Image (tube, rainbow, N blue to C red):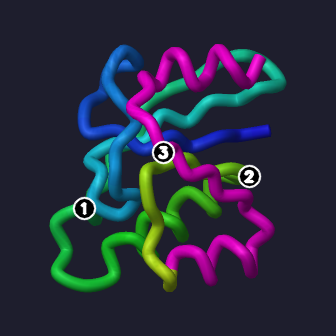
Amino acid sequence: MKVAVASDEPNINSAVALHFGRSKWFYVFDTFNQTGHFFENTNHLQIEGAGCNAASALIELGVEMAVAGRFGSKVTSLFRNSNVQQVLVEKPITIKKFVTQLK
């Protein structure tokens, strides 16, 4: 399964970003082969549609789970229609720790 974790820095030791659509990066982790890479969210500065455009790009990458502190309602609808699970992170956690818990 491919998991996209929102991040404000391209570093696995940084915290999971609070807002999905405004995060600058996504750490895309493949649980099958235990590899990951950072994917830049080039949409994060858009006035409108940042979250939906980011979600669409991740859906094209084959992401099946998205992780962030919060998701907008339009993103939630888009993910539901594409069968992408959303995980809300309520406490600060690093990307590395979250991914380790997936293993």
Q: Residues under labels 2 and 1: Cα distance?
A: 21 Å
Nearer mark to the viewer, of 1 and 3: 3
Residue drawn at x 72%, y 62% as measured from the top left: 84
SS at mark 2 in the image: loop
Report the amino acid beneath label 1.
Answer: His
Q: Specify the label residue 64 is tagged with.
A: 2
| Magenta span contains residue 100 | yes
| Magenta span contains residue 6 | no
SS at mark 3 in the image: loop
Q: Specify the label residue 90 is tagged with.
A: 3
Does 86 sit left or right of 96 as displayed?
A: right
For the C terminus, the image quarter is top right
SS at mark 1 in the image: loop
Q: Residues within 10 Å of mark 1 (few under 14, many from 20)?
A: some
Q: Residues under labels 1 and 3: Cα distance?
A: 21 Å
Which residues are drawn in magenta?
Answer: 75-103
Residue drawn at x 40%, y 58% as measured from the top left: 20
| Residue, disc 1 | 44
Does 48 sit left or right of 78 as displayed?
A: left
